[in-house]
Amino acid sequence: MQRLRIQVEGTVQGVGFRPFVYRIAVRHGLSGYVRNLGEAGVEIEVEGPPSALDQFLAALREEKPPLAEIERINIQKLAPSGERTFRILPSRDSGEGSGLIPPDTATCPHCLRDILDPNSRFHGYWATSCTDCGPRFTVVEALPYDRPRTAFRDFPLCPECERDYKDPLDRRYHAQTIACPACGPKLSFVREGREIPGDPILLALEALREGRILAIKGLGGTHLACEATREEVVAELRRRLGRPAQPFALMAREDQIPLFAEPNEEEWKLLRSPRRPIVVLLHKPGYLAPSVAPGLHTVGVMLPYSGLHHLLLRGLPFPLVMTSANFPGRPMLIENVRILEELASVADAFLLHNRRIVARCDDSVVRMGPTGPVFLRRSRGWVPEPIPLDLGEEPLLALGGDLNVTFALYARGKIFLSQHIGNTEELETLEFLREALDHFLRLLGLSLPRKIACDLHPAFPTRRLAEELGEAIPVQHHVAHVAGLAGEHRVQELVGIAMDGYGYGVDGTAWGGEVILWRRGEFKRVGHLRPVPMPGGDLAALRPGRMAASLLFAAGLPPEESGLPKEELQLVLAQIERGVNAPLATSAGRFLDAVAAWLGICKERTYEGEPAMKLEAFAAKGRALPLEPPLVPSGGGLVVDTVALFRELWKLRKKGARPEDLAATAQAALARGLARIAVGAAQEAGIPRVGITGGAAVNFALSQTVREEVERAGLRFLAHRRVPPGDGGLSFGQLLQASWLLGQARY
């Protein structure tokens, strides 16, 4: 007989790992115990014949529960004790380690079957889950992961749930989120400030069929929902929210999606995965209300991911708009009192529940790129799942930029990227960042790191916060993007193309269309777009016609073609000529904005990225005309002369080129120009790879054009797969760059 002590590290709490260990131990006739060790994972002691122990270890690795992720198994031989049974012991805290909480996942097929089975005690109950599914991150307060440390401590188990909870052979054994109609969270339907008697789900279905706008409290926040096929209903939601054009996400059943989109095999796989992200699909016009995604050729859709969603969607003949219930730049609402108060002017009725949301977590958004799925937002379904990467012994923190903020926390060989935080120029969102950071530190058993990476911009609230909390390490915006791309692919050198909106440059100017040669934290700007005045500063991002006027004026062309009103145009020209409030910018985003305004596609930005997104949709209806990108030497590198490029586009328009073709040509020429600079720099430096990053890297046409140029030159093309290429992944890159600057990185 032999006895082994086995410590398993990884995502092994809250995923049914202990009952799984119990079952395979009993199956192989072994004695001993299993228990949670807080942050240190799971501890197992097993005793039996050597052959049975070998079979147990093989099963441990090969048959793990669907949500479990084993990162490391440490084995120690002990003296046999003569123990006769195998037990599941209570959890024990154990200092430093690597216990991880899994993300929230969609209701599993077994639980869905229970919800729909008239003979099940869970029939029609919206909040049932088991060890294979349901909320985790949004309900956990601390480790070890036990019910008293979750939001479910407010709901004592009924005798039947307690029986399931204590049965090691039941799939709900130690499922900390177990609940049923007798003992679990309850729904309520509120209208005009009072709770309406009756079945809340039936009342909600009736309201949605009547064309009402509903606020629905979910796993990690609140959604606003309404019928997605009635234009007057969707338009009214836009009016009340003050979102004139920002695309709304949808929730639909599988049988409804082919009515408005044609997902390919990979997109169906993403839609059906337990992570259940919003997937951006090519849109088929004619079925949805035009106001769902005005001016775009894509629509974001997700399948139901909670019991509540399944019960609602089964009762409706139409898909739902399902958009986050927050005002622009602010965090989602999670408390019933505030939901009722702050959405009183938006929602006609409220479908609420009485379970606390411990951690806000917005929906993730994914789009297929040329090399696979690309995150537009990485949040529910992935957070707090870490990205393994060795950045040394000392913990580090990075706080991102100012828009689409996430933070990144490094400890013990893992990077934890936070859920979507938002726009930290809003005080409430900055407070949410602090709350979310405290929550992560508590879950990981960490103190606040002393060294904190942040953006180079001196006025960003996140930089001020870094300086307040510890030793700030400012990192240039686009260098962070490139460093993050390199880290994601575990390479130590890369020529990166950062196609972005705005970033504070090391020379104090506005960067945004950059080619950066990066080696182990050292970088060189080897190319960029031609700097052009940005009249009105930040106002030029909101009024894209200002950038069109700037480029037209610089090209010696009629600035009246910018589409700006006469008085505004006169002011813009005066700013440019006098150099007053017209900082120079190399921004790719501002160039795309200018083309969108000049072609009459978008004259005012009402949400982040709107002009470029509408330009991409418009360009998808055209084809790129042959146009060589004008490259000129400047400061030891090469520059894409966007002024000369704009002049060539203007000439093509005068010759009768279709606006759709001009849009496609502008995108292609911009991407090809930056790609050729990057390829040349990579070949000269002996670097075999070129990658694309930054907010505009989610544009399929731009990424595909860069990929073609890179691969034509025999180099390897890199794109983001694990973190968003935009500012949602900026903190990850800041962390990587800081680790190299500190001499810590070891990958």
Image (spheres, rainbow, N blue to C red):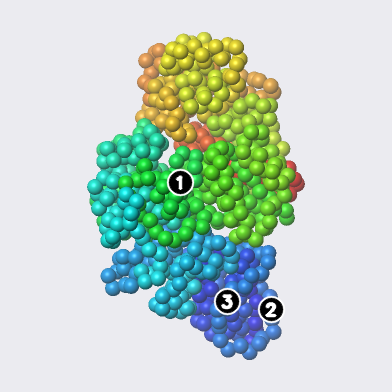
- The secondary element bearing badge 3 is classed as loop
Q: Which residue is mark 1?
A: 365
Q: Nearer the viewer, residue 6 or 383?
A: 383
User: Which residue is nearer to you in this view: 107 or 371?
Assistant: 107
Residue position for label 2: 77
Q: Amino acid at mark 1?
A: Val
Q: Left or right: where does residue 84 sit relative to residue 373?
A: right
Q: Nearer the viewer, mark 1 or mark 3?
A: 3
> Where is residue 219 drawn, in percent x and y?
44, 56
Give the mark nearest the N terminus, 1 or 3: 3
One can see residue 381 in this view: yes
Residues tagged 2 and 1 counted as in contact (Cβ below 8 A): no
As drawn, 735 above or below 133: above
Which secondary structure, mark 2? strand
Q: Nearer the viewer, mark 3 or mark 2?
A: 3
Q: Amino acid at mark 2?
A: Lys
For image coordinates 48% across by 27% down, the residue present is 542
How many C-alpha atoms fall within 10 Å of the one at disc 2: few (<14), some, or many (≥20)? few
| Residue hosting label 3 | 90
What is the CA distance from the residue labelled 1 to the residue labelled 3? 38 Å
Nearest to N terminus: mark 2 or mark 1: 2
> Can you see residue 113?
no
Q: Which residue sits at x=45%, y=29%?
A: 605
Total number of numbered discs in the rendering? 3
